Image (cartoon, coloured by chain):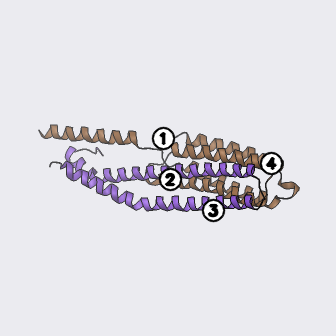
């Protein structure tokens, strides 16, 4: 029994693509929803400033907290993307484990 | 020849998996961290509800909530310590640092006094951070073994 490297690569890529394509829309959705929410909150601060309920100095404090929250959202989405990649890798390895383990005759993967 | 092929395949795969493990994060799902975050989120929600309810009254000042801020600070430090037990947990640690940064700013604003509309804005922002931290932790369940 021999290994077709191209075939293995294609199998892993297909499995990875399936895993990622399953998750990417979710990541996009998360980012879109959270940034939409953040935008609404920024608009609230703008309204409070326009209505004279807070001054410019206070609005700057709000803006700073909004910026930190935006960084937090990006960091989380990045983290979710990384775990998606890891899931894709695991799917790829699982997909070829049987074939590879058969060739090397021990549970390598 | 067969043996050499097997060895070559084994070596290539070990290199491949080794390279992948070096490049990809391996922070496992941590049920203790998850539970701690969920508890913390509940308490922070209750805290903002209380701040909103007391707003405009004498009970709504920062001094009335200083113990809560101190307790939250300690709990965030404990959660960070829990998260730091896992290698390559950068996204969670960064999100926790940003949460702490925002909490410090919320407290500073509270010292100066909050109007009711501001409580809503701040609650929304902090809640976003807490919710995403829980979501990020739960995403680890599908990609790695559970941690301690």
User: Disc 3 vs disc 1: which is toward the camera?
Assistant: 3
Mark 2 vs mark 1: tell me if same chain: no
Q: Residues within 10 Å of mark 4 (few under 14, many from 20)?
A: few
Q: Chain of mark 1?
A: B
Residue picked out by circle 4: B112
Chain-order first, disc 2 or disc 3: 3
For the residues bearing labels 2 and 3, Cβ distance under 8 angstroms: no
Q: Chain of mark 3?
A: A
Mark 4 vs mark 2: tell me if same chain: no
For the residues bearing labels 1 and 4, Cβ distance under 8 angstroms: no
Q: Is residue A30 above or below residue A4?
A: below
Residue picked out by circle 3: A40
Question: How much space separates mark 3 and mark 1, taking CA atoms?
Answer: 33 Å
SS for dot 2: helix
Q: Chain of mark 4?
A: B
Give the residue drawn at x 51%, y 41%.
B86
For the residues bearing labels 2 and 1, Cβ distance under 8 angstroms: no
Give the residue drawn at x 29%, y 53%.
A12
Which chain gets the brown colouring? B
Q: Can residue B116 be seen from the camera position used here?
A: yes
Give the residue drawn at x 29%, y 38%.
B15
Q: Residues within 10 Å of mark 1 (few under 14, many from 20)?
A: some
Mark 2 vs mark 3: tell me if same chain: yes
Residue picked out by circle 1: B88
Q: Furthest residue to the left?
A: B1
Which chain gets the purple colouring? A
């Amino acid at each position: 029994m021999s290994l077709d490297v191209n075939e293995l690569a294609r199998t892993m890529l297909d499995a990875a693509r399936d895993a990622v394509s399953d998750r990417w829309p979710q990541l996009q959705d998360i980012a879109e929803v959270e940034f939409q929410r953040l935008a609404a909150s920024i608009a609230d601060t703008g309204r409070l400033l326009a209505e004279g309920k807070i001054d410019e100095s206070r609005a700057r404090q709000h803006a700073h907290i909004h910026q930190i929250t935006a960084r937090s959202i990006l960091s989380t989405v990045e983290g979710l993307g990384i775990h998606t990649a890891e899931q894709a890798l695991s799917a790829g390895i699982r997909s070829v484990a049987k074939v590879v383990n058969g060739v090397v005759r021990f549970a390598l993967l | 020849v067969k043996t050499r092929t097997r060895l070559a395949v084994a070596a290539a795969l070990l290199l491949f998996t080794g390279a992948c493990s070096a490049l990809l994060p391996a922070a496992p799902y941590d049920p203790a961290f998850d539970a701690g975050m969920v508890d913390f989120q509940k308490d922070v929600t209750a805290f903002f509800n209380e701040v909103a309810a007391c707003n405009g009254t004498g009970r709504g000042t920062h001094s009335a909530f200083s113990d809560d801020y101190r307790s939250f600070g300690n709990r965030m430090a404990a959660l960070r310590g829990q998260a730091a037990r896992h290698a390559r947990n950068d996204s969670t640690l960064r999100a926790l640092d940003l949460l702490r940064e925002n909490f410090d700013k919320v407290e500073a604003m509270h010292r100066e006094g909050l109007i009711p509309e501001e409580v809503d804005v701040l609650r929304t922002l902090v809640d976003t951070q807490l919710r995403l931290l829980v979501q990020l932790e739960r995403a680890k369940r599908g990609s790695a073994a559970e941690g301690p």
